[in-house]
Amino acid sequence: MRIIKNLMFVVGVTLLLSSCAVSKSPLTGFLYMDVKAPLTATGNSGSSKVGTASAQSILGIVATGDASIDAAAKSAGITKIHHIDEQATSILGIIATYKVYVYGE
Amino acid sequence: MLLTKFMYMVNNHLKRTYLVRPFFIFFLLIITAGVTNAQKLSKYYTSAMQESGVLYFIEPKQEFKNNKENCKFTYDLTYLSTKDTVLLNFTYLDNTIRVIDSISIIYGDKHISSIAEKIFIETDKKFWKHRYSSNFLFKDIFLLFQQEKSPIVVIYYQDKHTQLKIKKSKWTKQSAIISKILMLINANKKTP
């Protein structure tokens, strides 16, 4: 019983001291989030390529990745950007991902 | 005496239930979120409607590997509904820099190949990250994901080659999702 109490104390303190993993999004969902939204659009016409780039966060403690527009465009060899979408996912505030989709030529 | 003992047992039982319940609810939430997440087909592709047709982008999660040579291969598929070809962009991780000429996919008794065009090469921790682009016919890619047997990816560079494989269980999961998306794309094609 003492072990369970100690374990619960450690988990509780960890959760209280650390913020949850949250990703930039127009809407928020604490339990589960999978939202796709527009980021920007340009005057260039048409797109035949799609490039992505993402960054992840664990428990809001560690966050890594390169979710820049440049990285996403580079991944598909896009030089003329048509429009950009973003996607934010989060599961119980434990793992959060932010992803950028670049459409262009 | 008996009543005190009984009260103690009930108290203990209540305490245990009180302590265990949050954990149970927490794990139940994780499982529910996981299951809901896994069932969504839209998680694996995006589509954008435009003047020149519908642009589909499919991004499989599983990777091909060659454990002996310590190489990894990941890919994504881009398809414009008015075209016959699928753009396969891939990332190939190797210990040394390679000048990749072409890529082949072997499935069943069929063998499809394409010239690989370089997008960029950069470092990724201890690996060299090669980002290349290739084109395949839509019907060949459609057939590839109908296969039950896992395919082999062959990367050709300077008269040498590397074979990369995927685990049967990973392929079964991946091919089921991608073939469903390709069926969806096929069904949405405009008939002339």
Image (cartoon, coloured by chain):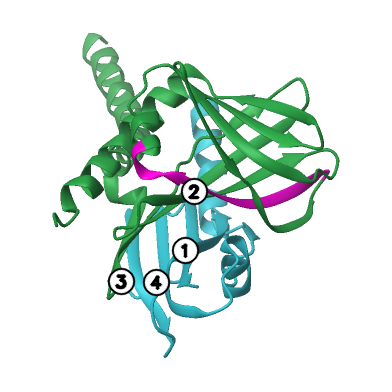
Residue wearing tag 2 = B76
Select label 4 or label 1 by which is in front. Answer: 1
**The C terminus of chain B is located in which quarter?**
bottom left
- Which kind of residue does numbered mark 1 sit on? Val
Dominant SS type (magenta): strand
CA distance separating discs 4 and 2: 25 Å
Task: Reply above or below: A38 against A33.
Answer: below
Cβ–Cβ under 8 Å for marks 2 and 1: yes
Q: Residues within 10 Å of mark 2 (few under 14, many from 20)?
A: many
Q: Which residue is drawn at the image coordinates 38% and 28% (left, top)?
A: B173
Q: Given this view, does label 4 or label 2 mark the residue nearer the observer?
A: 2
Front tag of 4 and 3:
3
The residue singled out by tag 4 in the image is A25
Colour-to-chain, green:
B
Query: Marks 2 and 3: CB-CB under 8 Å?
Result: no
Name the residue located 79 percent from the left edge and 29 percent from the top edge: B160
Residue B128 lies in magenta, yes or no?
Answer: yes
In the depicted structure, whether residue A40 falls above or below residue B79: below
Q: Quadrant of residue B179?
A: top left
Amino acid type for the residue under numbered disc 4: Ser
Which residue is label 1 attached to?
A50
Is B44 left or right of B123, judged from the image as shown? Answer: left
Mark 2 or 3 closer to N-term?
3
- Marks 3 and 1: which is nearer the front? 3
Q: Nearer the viewer, residue B76 or B187?
A: B187
Within 10 Å of the Cα at label 4, are there few (<14), some (14-19), or many (20+) other Cα atoms? some
- Of residue B6 and residue A5, the one placed in the foreground of this image is A5
